[in-house]
């Protein structure tokens, strides 16, 4: 997608401000502002409609008891996204490009195929979420709502024609709007903050259903496609001229990641404890889909609460779907060296959602399954990320410390173990 003259000017101004911060060694919020953007784009993927499905089902069925999974998943997300952003800053390349450069062709093709599966599972969740929001809020037929979602997300992506800053600002505003929506939901639902505090740190997995939802929460939170994307967002944004600038840019990036993903984590927690307070505590423990959640919220908390819920869902679906398309372009270009027109990818990735809607499948159940698929794919990009970020010949001064690589590897192994438990449990094996 081309950049106009005005877009080029906008980008030059943003880069000039960042360069001034680096030269004058500024600190604090004013110094951070020119570097804000990439992590907020990545953070949108952590509050997509798949999170609504898994968090609402978890909260209504098990109350506050799976909040610790949200906290764990968010800590994992911060750690992994920091590595991905650092890779782009240190190398000027994104993760798929490095995979193509260093891995054998069969391995590279396998990673690409699984990455595309993850991107399609992500798009399915995001499209369904936005379509459901339009359907419930405006009573638009679900199939028509799916087409409107496709057009809307394509228009959001067109902001890229005006430079990276307008798109970054738009996505950041969407996350802030979601945060405001769930602040309102928190005030209305009146959750138990004592229960929130306890269950945010006390692990619990009671049965196979709880394990499946826990894996779904992790799959909905730590997203494979955005692990690939974040390195692409930072690779050419502000080019460091020496090792000192690499360290300084990485420091600002880390601060931005913490701010963006802590906000995303709080939104995810509020989804679950809102469901715990509004549904589980009132005996509605069988809320397993977004439509029922919306209809049940109205008599419990009033029409304003249910309307705010749908606004946040719409915001999530449209913005995360746009980010998912961006990730798909980075993945294809990096792994196989070519891209398809943006409108073609937008149309192709709509097809699974249209099939699901046309067949009349349960949208929320489909959302949960899509998040489990994501968690199955997740270890692959994490292991690739660890491999590259620990190599000093590739990363230079930003190479991982040994403890950093160990923690990242542990995260990947943990996801694998949870997936094995899920699969065994699904076949009736008692864990």
Image (tube, helix red, strand yellow):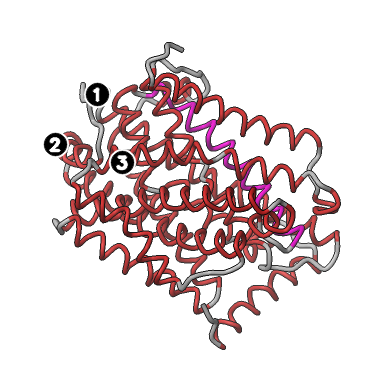
- Residue highlighted by disc 3: 366
Along the line of sight, which residue is nearer the eye, 22 or 115? 115
- The secondary structure making up most of the magenta span is helix
- Residue highlighted by disc 2: 299
Along the line of sight, which residue is nearer the eye, 86 or 259? 86
Along the line of sight, which residue is nearer the eye, 238 or 305? 238
Residue segment shown in magenta: 64-91
Q: Secondary structure at mark 3?
A: helix
Residue 54: percent from left, percent from top: 36, 35
228 left or right, relative to 404: left
- The answer to the question of whether label 3 and label 2 lie on touching residues, with beta carbons closer than 8 A, is no
Spatial CA span between label 3 and label 2: 26 Å
Spatial CA span between label 1 and label 3: 19 Å
Spatial CA span between label 2 and label 1: 16 Å
Q: Secondary structure at mark 1?
A: loop
| Residue at left offset 61%, top offset 34% | 412
Residue 12: percent from left, percent from top: 65, 79
- Point out which mark residue 285 bears: 1
Q: Earlier in the sequence, mark 2 or mark 1?
A: 1
Can residue 44 be seen by looking at this rendering? yes
| Residue at left offset 54%, top offset 31% | 72
């Amino acid at each position: 997608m081309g950049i106009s003259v005005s877009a080029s000017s906008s980008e030059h101004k943003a880069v000039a401000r960042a360069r001034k911060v680096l030269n004058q060694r500024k600190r604090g919020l004013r110094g951070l502002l020119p570097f804000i953007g990439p992590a907020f784009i990545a953070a949108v993927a952590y509050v997509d409609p798949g999170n609504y499905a898994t968090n609402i089902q978890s909260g209504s069925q098990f109350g506050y008891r799976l909040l610790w999974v949200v906290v764990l998943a968010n800590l994992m997300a911060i750690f992994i996204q920091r590595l991905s952003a650092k890779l782009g800053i240190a190398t000027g390349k994104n993760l798929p490009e490095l995979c193509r450069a260093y891995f054998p062709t069969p391995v590279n093709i396998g990673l690409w195929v699984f990455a595309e599966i993850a991107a399609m599972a992500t798009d399915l969740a995001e499209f369904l979420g936005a379509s459901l929001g339009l359907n419930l809020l405006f009573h638009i037929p679900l199939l028509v709502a799916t087409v409107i979602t496709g057009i809307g997300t394509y228009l959001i992506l067109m902001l890229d024609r005006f430079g990276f800053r307008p798109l970054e600002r738009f996505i950041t505003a969407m996350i802030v709007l979601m945060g405001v929506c769930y602040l309102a939901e928190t005030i209305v639902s009146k959750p138990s903050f004592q229960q929130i505090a306890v269950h945010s740190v006390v692990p619990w997995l009671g049965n196979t259903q709880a394990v499946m939802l826990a894996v779904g929460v992790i799959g909905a939170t730590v997203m494979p496609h955005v692990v690939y994307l974040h390195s692409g967002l930072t690779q050419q944004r502000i080019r460091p001229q020496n090792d000192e600038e690499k360290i300084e840019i990485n420091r600002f990036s880390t601060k931005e990641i913490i701010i963006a993903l802590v906000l995303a984590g709080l939104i995810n927690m509020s989804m679950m404890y809102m469901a715990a307070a509004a549904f589980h505590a009132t005996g509605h423990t069988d809320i397993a889909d977004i439509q029922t959640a919306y209809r049940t919220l109205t008599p419990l908390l009033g029409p304003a609460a249910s309307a705010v819920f749908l606004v946040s869902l719409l915001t999530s679906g449209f913005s995360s779907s746009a980010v998912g398309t961006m990730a798909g372009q980075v993945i294809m270009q990096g792994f196989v060296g070519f891209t398809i027109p943006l409108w073609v990818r937008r149309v192709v990735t709509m097809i699974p959602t249209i099939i699901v809607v046309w067949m009349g499948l349960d949208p929320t159940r489909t959302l949960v399954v899509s998040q489990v698929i994501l968690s199955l794919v997740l270890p692959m990009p994490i292991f690739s990320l660890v491999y590259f970020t620990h190599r000093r010949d590739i990363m230079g001064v930003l190479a991982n410390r040994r403890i950093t690589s160990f923690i990242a590897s542990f995260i990947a192994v943990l996801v694998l173990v949870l997936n094995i438990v899920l699969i065994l449990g699904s076949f009736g094996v008692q864990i």
